[in-house]
Image: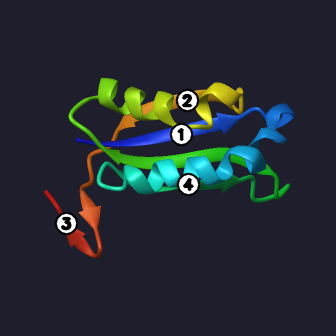
């Protein structure tokens, strides 16, 4: 199953980001088979950080939660909220999938 994971960050904890970024990126690389894509989100008008987005291939939402909680960013308090949403692709790369 494919999941979209949307993170909202607590910008009062933004000072934690640079310190833990190398470990966070290493974690993503080590789990690249499941975490297909990941990156930050920004507010377009104000150009301020707005959290992050992952696309995760996993058997169920519980497995996705395990990845989230294993991420070095998790214990820092940087993550204000997390939404795990099942995503069914119906169109990709110019092709209908259903």
The answer to which of marks 2 and 4 sits earlier in the sequence is 4
Contact (Cβ within 8 Å) of mark 3 with mark 1: no
Say left or right for 77 vs 48.
Answer: left
Mark 3 vs mark 1: in front: 1
Contact (Cβ within 8 Å) of mark 4 with mark 3: no
Mark 2 vs mark 4: in front: 4
Colour option used: rainbow
The answer to which of marks 4 and 3 sits earlier in the sequence is 4
Residue drawn at 47 percent across, 51 percent down: 28
Q: Residue furthest bottom?
A: 94
From the image, tell me which residue sits under label 1.
6
Say above or below: 95 vs 73.
Answer: below
- How far, Cα to Cα, is label 3 from label 2? 30 Å
Q: Which disc, if any, is residue 96?
A: 3
Q: Which disc, if any, is residue 82?
A: 2
Contact (Cβ within 8 Å) of mark 3 with mark 2: no
Contact (Cβ within 8 Å) of mark 1 with mark 2: yes
The answer to which of marks 1 and 2 sits earlier in the sequence is 1
């Amino acid at each position: 199953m494919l999941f979209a994971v949307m993170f909202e960050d607590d910008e009062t904890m933004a000072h934690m980001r640079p310190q833990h970024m190398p470990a966070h990126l290493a974690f993503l690389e080590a789990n690249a088979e499941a975490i297909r894509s990941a990156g930050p989100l920004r507010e377009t008008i104000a150009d301020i950080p707005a959290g992050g987005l992952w696309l995760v291939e996993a058997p169920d939402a519980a497995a996705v939660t395990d990845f989230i909680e294993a991420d070095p960013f998790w214990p820092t308090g940087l993550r204000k909220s997390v939404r795990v949403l099942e995503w069914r692709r119906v169109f990709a790369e110019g092709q209908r999938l259903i």
